[in-house]
Image (cartoon, helix red, strand yellow):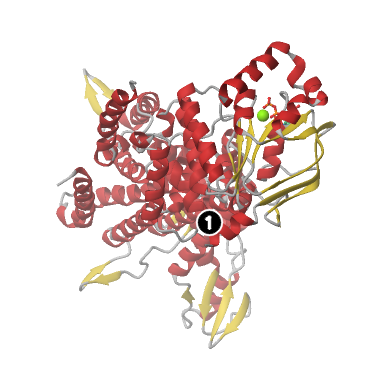
Amino acid sequence: MLNNQKKSMLELEVKNLNKKFGGLHVLKNLTFGIKGPELVGLIGPNGAGKTTLTNILDGAIKPSSGTVYLNGQRIDQLPPFEVAKVGLGRTFQVTRSFRRMTVLENLYVPALAKHVAVDKSEVMRRALEVLDFLTMDHLRNEYAQALSGGQQKLLELGRLLMLDPDIIILDEPFAGVHPKLMEIIYEYIRKVNAEGKAIVLISHQMDSIFSLCKRLLVLNYGDLIADGEPEDVKHDPVVVDAYLGKDDDEDSKSTNDIKQNST
Amino acid sequence: MNRQQTLWLISILIIVFFIAFPFLYGRKDYDYIMHVCITGFFYAILASSWSMLAGYAGQFSFGHMAFMGLGAYGTALFSHYFYLSPVPTNLCTEFEIGDQYFIIKNAVGVTSSTLDQDCLTKALAVWDGSIQITPMPIWIGIILGALLGGIFGLLIGMLVLRLRAAYLALFTLGFSEILRATISAEIKITRGQAGIELPYLFENGISIFGHEFSKTDKIPPYYVMLFLLLACMAVLAWLAKSRFGLFVRALREDEDAAAALGVNTVRFKIMVFVITSTMAALAGAVQAHYIGIITPNNLMILQMSLVVAMAVIGGLENFAAAAIGAIIIQFLLELLRESFVIGGVEVDMTLWRLVFFGAVLMITLRFYRNGLITPIIEFFTRAHVASETVEKRGFQKTEDVE
Ligand SMILES: Nc1ncnc2c1ncn2[C@@H]1O[C@H](COP(=O)(O)OP(=O)(O)OP(=O)(O)O)[C@@H](O)[C@H]1O
Ligand SMILES: [Mg+2]
């Protein structure tokens, strides 16, 4: 099918990417790529530049220099709505649902925006499917502002499913989320990834990152200081020094969590 | 019959009522009441199109009356300066078109002195009634006026793209005032505060089903304005239901999120400006031909606040509610003109009605943020939703207990 062809060429290429805000050099010569349906964790201390990188990939802000290609198409100069259509979707660190629109309407927006000619009943069917998966079926006619914070996060994830991009960047999907909801998000990430989408997961929760991701990117004040398998990255002295090892307690705690999760 | 169907029935009854009204009403203040209706329809077009702009798309423009004015002045200037004549005047700027001459009258401003007459008046004096000149058809002027509004809507839409909330309001307010000041100042062309006269909608009268109507009869303009209102409502209804409505509401809620989900926010923002400005300009052009004169005072901020208040009281986020609100308020404002005596003190309602109006506005803003009409409409369209959700939520809760 056409879909499969698209997925086989899924490729994000970031080359020599720089971003300066005035004198502040926020992203320093980043080069990395994502090939195929990878599940990549992006970590780094507060202010490392993770959200800025997301904003550049998504087209919301333009890089100072460097290029970004998605599936062979240059996207770093495109506006966000075109990047979305090329195949990159993202969530926001601070949840941004369309508050005074119903849950269903929230879901319709990306579906109708992506394709000019769509069968509305097909969109409706997809939306109900998505809500079912997110266990939010009973809320479909509620205004988004009536949802809890966690449910709004789920709604944002649901909108991405309706956009159906090739690569998804999740900026802190676990922040302020109850364990039960976390389960749903875990399942979401695994399922969406298994369906052939690449996922970039930004999180400060090391246990989640280590249990989900097969590859880690570590940003430290604009420098990409590590890129590799989680186990290697975890023991990389540079990373330990810059990020993981700052607090001994933190480190041992997250290691424990990994052990728990792997059993 | 479910509630949705009831709503349809009520809407149709309201429309039928207004269509039949001129034949049902027979009191001796007929012309006055008809005039209130026509003005009510005019404001309904402005309030409902503004609700699309401000309520649906979240673009709180205070320039809507300026677009109305562009339409009115567009057609006024067109009919004032352009004529067709079978022979050249040899005084005016003129072009030969077929067997006619297209005459452009020169601008002389407000003058009654014989010293400073426009070229056409001079030519007519020479011809002394032997030559008939033809004014331009007013429908061309109305269309040009609407286009003028649309073009300025495009420009303003592009200029305010990056402006949000208060800045957009201030910018459009500034635009509106600049336009008004320019029209007031350009006395030579626009006749300034004196206003510019326009031919009536049916300057030579009109015959409908064998009945002759004069140019000041109210029935023909009543139906013209009612038809215009219904046409605008149909367009707005279609827009609100289509992806356009969905996308402009999404960009109202969160522009960045809408863009990240594939919505071309720039395009839809500009489109909503162009469409609503064109509607305002169209209404302005037709209303100007109905009244027969347009002055810069029609563009005043006070007029804009009236439209805003009508939309807010009706319901900002529902164009139909805004339109109904406008008509009801127009009627209330007129009916409340009647002064009365209470305990020997005469209450001058021409002044107090505005206080009353202000109070209603404040109460609406404080207690009924959705307006007074929207909740009634939503009773028919959304009521089932809440109960359904409560039911399912209860179901979900029991399921959640493990
Ligand atoms: N629009 C902006 N103008 C100026 N500086 C900015 C702008 N956006 C981000 N920055 C700066 O860039 C740096 C990186 O910010 P960014 O939000 O990308 O960090 P982050 O890695 O997402 O942090 P966190 O983990 O706290 O979310 C910070 O120093 C921030 O102050
Ligand atoms: Mg961030």
Q: Is B297 located above or below residue A184 in the figure?
A: below
In the rendered structure, the answer to whether residue A144 lies left or right of residue B314 reads right
Q: Where is residue B3, by image quadrant?
A: top left
Where in the image, quadrant-wise, is ligand 1 located? top right
Circle 1 Cα neighbour tier, 10 Å, few/some/many (<14 / 14–19 / ≥20): many
Asked if one can make out residue B253 in the rendered structure from this viewpoint, the answer is no
Q: Is B301 located above or below residue A203 in the figure?
A: below
Chain letter for the residue marked with disc 1 in the picture: B
Q: Residue at x 30, y 37 (%)?
A: B373
Which residue type does callout 1 highlight? Gly
Q: Nearer the viewer, residue A33 or B147?
A: A33
- Farthest-out residue, bottom: B99
Helix, strand or loop at mark 1: helix
- Quadrant of the snapshot with the C terminus of chain A: top right
Look at mark 1 in the image and give the residue it sits on. B149
Q: Residue at x 31, y 28 (%)?
A: B396
Asked if one can make out residue A210 in the rendered structure from this viewpoint, the answer is yes
